[in-house]
């Protein structure tokens, strides 16, 4: 968090040394992203107030992508509300279980990828690596 910019520049320098060609930076932006780190971080809502997308914690902890989860959870909730369930909150929780399990997998993936030891093993294994010129 504290030296992200310096680390990023170091990575760019290392990649330039390995043959990657970067142009001049035109614009730089950054932001802090809040993402789930445990099962309890997924909140579907309460008292007939429903949460979808990022508000419900539906964002990938490994890639920080959330558009498809926002669209999927909105679609699920829309169907449930239109089907007029007796307990729509229970039905929504049930419907999003698969999505939440998928996102738990992303949390595990993120933990592995941000662990230096595991990361080094993955890099050394050259799985899906981009060959340098
Ligand atoms: C820089 C950046 C890059 C990203 N890139 C990708 C990507 O490449 N692929 C991907 O899948 N995801 C990406 N994401 C994540 C993705 O944008 C979000 O996960 C997704 O937009 C979440 O959708 P949402 O509808 O849940 O929330 P949002 O898109 O955040 O929509 C919430 C809306 O509610 C409004 N709002 C908030 N409070 C109130 C209020 N009190 N009253 C009324 N309105 C309110 C907000 O203004 C906003 O318009 C990126 C995020 C960032 C920040």
Image (cartoon, rainbow, N blue to C red):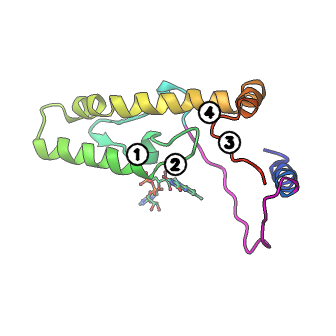
Q: Residues within 10 Å of mark 4 (few under 14, many from 20)?
A: some
Quadrant the C terminus occupies: bottom right
Observer-side mark, 3 or 1, equals 3
Q: CA distance from mark 3 to mark 4?
A: 18 Å
Q: CA distance from mark 2 to mark 1?
A: 8 Å
Q: Residues within 10 Å of mark 3 (few under 14, many from 20)?
A: few
Q: Position of residue 77 (x, y in %)?
A: 25, 44
Main SS, magenta residues: loop
Answer with mark 3 or mark 1, whichever residue precedes in sequence.
1
Observer-side mark, 3 or 4, equals 3
**The image quarter in which residue 73 lies:** top left
Q: CA distance from mark 3 to mark 1?
A: 28 Å
Q: Residues within 10 Å of mark 2 (few under 14, many from 20)?
A: some
Residue drawn at (73%, 28%) of the image: 115
Q: Position of residue 62 (x, y in %)?
A: 58, 39
The answer to if 23 sits in the magenta stretch is: yes
> Does mark 1 have its CB less than 8 Å from ligand 1?
yes
- The numbered disc on residue 129 is 3
Q: CA distance from mark 1 to mark 4?
A: 17 Å
Secondary structure beneath disc 2? loop
Q: Are marks 2 and 1 in contact (CB under 8 Å)?
A: yes
- Residue assigned mark 2: 65
Secondary structure beneath disc 1? helix
Q: Position of residue 95 (x, y in %)?
A: 27, 33
């Amino acid at each position: 968090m504290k030296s992200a910019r310096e680390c990023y520049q170091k990575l760019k320098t290392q990649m330039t040394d390995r043959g990657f060609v970067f142009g001049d930076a035109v614009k730089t932006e950054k932001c802090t992203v809040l993402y789930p780190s445990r099962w309890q971080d997924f909140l579907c809502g309460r008292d007939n107030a429903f949460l979808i997308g990022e508000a419900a914690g539906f964002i990938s902890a490994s890639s920080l992508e959330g558009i498809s989860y926002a669209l999927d959870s909105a679609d699920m909730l829309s169907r449930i509300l239109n089907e007029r369930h007796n307990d729509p909150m229970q039905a929504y929780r049930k419907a999003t279980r698969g999505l939440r399990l998928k996102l738990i997998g992303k949390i595990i993936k993120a933990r592995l990828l941000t662990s230096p030891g595991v990361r080094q093993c993955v890099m050394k294994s050259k799985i899906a690596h981009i060959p340098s010129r």
